[in-house]
Image (spheres, rainbow, N blue to C red):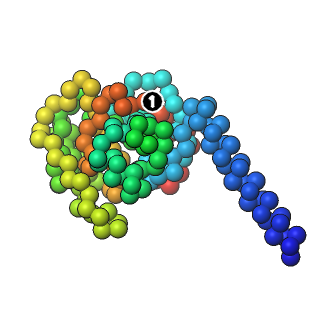
Amino acid sequence: MKKTIKILAVLILTMIVSVFVLSIGARISGVYINTTPSLPVGFYKVVDEPIVRGAYVAFCPPQNAVFDMARNRSYINQGNCPGGYGLLLKRVFAQPGDTVFIDQTGIFVNGEHLPNSAQLKADAEGHALPQYHLDQRVLDDFEYLLLSDVNPQSFDARYFGLIARDQIQQVVRPVFTWGH
């Protein structure tokens, strides 16, 4: 019995160390492992492409009260971005020159209502969510709208608004994903 427990403990430890080493190796090689439901779960590779509508991007959130709340409630991971935030992966839905309107009913880009973009009043735990509002306007040269189109509960532009170009670190492309 003790021998079986010892073997099981070694196997579990080996698996934990292997996952840790693989995740470090993936990051060094320019691969992100997405485990959140905001985008399809899987592997995303950094690519040298422009930031355009439809692209997936990795960004460091701006340091502010909304992202402090998100980190404290575990909507986002801790990480190496300013404020101790982790990098987020989202999809670009509006870029400079696009007209955007955001209210509780959802997000409109160039007059089109985006699916799954209505703001929720509370999270799954019953905590009130920020209710971001943006009057209709054309995005400036440095502004982007980033959100999830696969998860209506995602913490995205519905709650934190627009993201500045200098927050975006890389464009990424899905390599192998599953679940959506």
| Side (left or right) of 40 relative to 166 | right
Residue 101 location, quadrant:
top left
Tell me if residue 132 comes above or below residue 45 in the rendering.
Answer: below
Q: Is residue 35 above or below residue 161?
A: below
Name the residue located 33 percent from the left edge and 56 percent from the top edge: 152
Dot 1: within a 10 Å radius of its alpha carbon, few (fewer than 14), some, or many (20 or more) residues? some
Q: Which residue is mark 1?
A: 170
Q: Give the image location of residue 80, x and y in percent.
A: 48, 38
Instruction: Describe the element under mark 1 as helix, strand or loop.
Output: strand
Q: What amino acid type should be assigned to the residue bearing mark 1?
A: Gln
Q: Residue at x 54, y 39 (%)?
A: 32
Q: Residue at x 67, y 43 (%)?
A: 22
Residue in front for this viewpoint, 32 or 60: 60
Determine if residue 88 is in view: no
Nearer-the-camera pick, 126 or 114: 126
Residue 146 percent across, percent down from the top left = 32, 40
Is residue 96 visible in the rendered image? The answer is yes
Query: Residue 63 at what x, y percent from top left?
Result: 33, 39
Which is nearer the eye, 14 or 97?
14
- Residue 90 percent across, percent down from the top left: 39, 41
Reply above or below: 97 against 17.
Answer: above
